[in-house]
Image (spheres, rainbow, N blue to C red):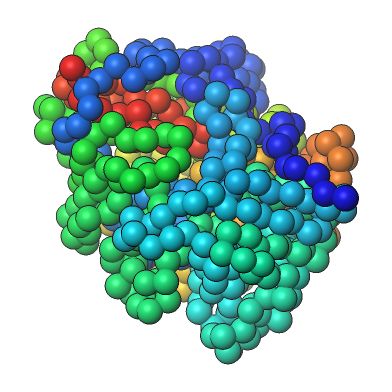
Amino acid sequence: MKKRLTTLGAALGVSALLLSACGGSGGNGDGGKDGGGSPVEVSGTKASDTYEGQEGGEITFAGCNPQDLLIPGFTQETCGGNVLDSILVGLTEVDPSTGKPRLANAESIEANDENTMFTVKLKDWKFDDGSPVTAKSYVDAWNWGANGANGAKQQAFFGPGFLDVKGYDKVAESKDKGATMEGLKVVDDKTFTVETTSANSLFETMVVHSTYMPLPEAFFKDHEAYGKKPIGNGPFKLTEYKQEQQIVLEKNTDYQGEAKAHVDKLTFKMYTEPGAAYADVVAGNVDYVDAIPPDAVAGNKWQTDLGEGRWQLGPSTLWNGYSFPQYDEKFKDPKVRQAISMAIDRQAVTDAVTNGENTPGTAWSPPGIEPFQDDVCGDKCHVDGEAAKKLLEEGGGFEGTLTIAFNNDGPGNKEVTEAVCTSINENLGIDCQPQSFPTFAEMLDKIDAKEMTGMYRSGWQADFPSPLSYLTAYYITNAGSNKSGYSNPEYDKMASDILSQDEAEQEATFKKMQETLAEDMPVTPLWYGTLRLGWSDKVVAPKVTWKSTIDFTTAGLKK
């Protein structure tokens, strides 16, 4: 017997209020201790329910330089992710009105009673080069991404804790680029099956992520050429990529999905200095920006600079913290990591850098992605200098200078790192110094090479609408984004078991996973982000996606 997947994500989806950026709850913090509290309320100008701009024309967005080639299995950061999300659509997508997965390129997805066999039937879609999107487009893409010989950074998304496709373990270790997972079978041009090693109740939710996008035949002929000019099946198509300068997208007039673009051209202008991007949007030289520098945030100067009708402040599903490189002997003892975490006055940092609008982090997934576990970190995420010093001593102390790395092309990264170091200096009595990298890509290269000798800035934008997205990629052993070297077999097992649990069991497991992170402290939470959008006076207010990014299909020129 088979069942249609239509309700997955109901318990794990993002709040519809947060998704549409048209609501909020409560104020900031609890006024007494750092941590907890509710996200900032939405203010400023919100997008109309229906598009009120003109059709056609050109708009620009202040973007950043992708670290890697624009290939779904490689891209791990928002600079490239924003582009791929605009040109690729997979089996499912998040419905902006409900916050739940809905079918996109898939005509249907049926699961057996055990949620271990999934039959996928595709709609009749095409890539923007005119070639058909077939079952083979997905099966070949997934096999390529999972195959260890290809070195895809998102390889782990096909293994335990994620889709867990049958045969992944053999393919992941393979040096044969032709090796394939036995759990993937092409039935016909528009049908394929996916067999998993363990039950997966979140299949339809997970495949929202860009790692699971289809790839055309052209990709397999020349990966590098594809990465410089990817071919997609989404509302936009990429027509130009000048590294460190701009990426140009044009409307895909043949797109067969629901959310179609209104503009003819969307250009991502690359910035390495956030102040310059902000100055350009104020002056009207660029149309949309999603990051505001701290000197403009102070006293809400940015709202005055932009003027009425040109900004929006609201809650965000972005999570931020700092990672400890556990391959460095200084950070081997969890008590040392816990001590540093307890030395950070999160409320003071938030007040100093964000007007108190960000919410101090006390969990490893943010509000808005349910079920949210507030203050699950306990005392390890509340400032206590004396307790921190005691823990540090028990952990063997810390010699030399503690560095915290950040990328200077992100607004506020310098200021927040300085504030965190000041807090650690005052509360723990060790020398803490910020370490600057010019760009996010350069810092990621060092992190990927495991060459970090101090803490480093970490942040997460959800891959799919579930706390599991935040609790897997950084923490499962050998997962693609687990660069700190953290490994805990019990944690790995919880991440795998949760996929076969019911709603109540899942909520309890999410809590236990985060309690484990509080004890091991591979990454310490800092805060839950706040969305700040600005735009020029010639464009309409955009809608916001479930993962707190601009929905470019709703952006456009005023009439």
Asked whether residue 453 is in view, the answer is: no
Asked whether residue 210 is in view, the answer is: yes
Between 312 and 348, the one nearer to me in the picture: 312
Between 483 and 310, the one nearer to me in the picture: 310
Rendered image quadrant of residue 300: top left
The residue located at (83%, 36%) in the rendering is 503
Q: How many marks?
A: 0
Instruction: Estimate the x, y position of residue 217 in percent, counting from the top left.
Output: 42, 71
Can you say which quadrant of the picture contains the C terminus?
Answer: top left
Between 363 and 351, the one nearer to me in the picture: 363
The residue located at (86%, 40%) in the rendering is 502
As drawn, 341 above or below 135? above
The residue located at (48%, 21%) in the rendering is 21
Q: Is residue 520 left or right of residue 251?
A: right
Rendered image quadrant of residue 69: bottom left
The residue located at (71%, 81%) in the rendering is 170
Instruction: Estimate the x, y position of residue 91 in percent, counting from the top left.
Output: 57, 50
Instruction: Estimate the x, y position of residue 367 in percent, counting from the top left.
Output: 62, 29
Instruction: Estimate the x, y position of residue 65 in percent, counting from the top left.
Output: 29, 55
Q: Is residue 504 left or right of residue 95?
A: right
As drawn, 69 above or below 221? above
As drawn, 309 above or below 130? above
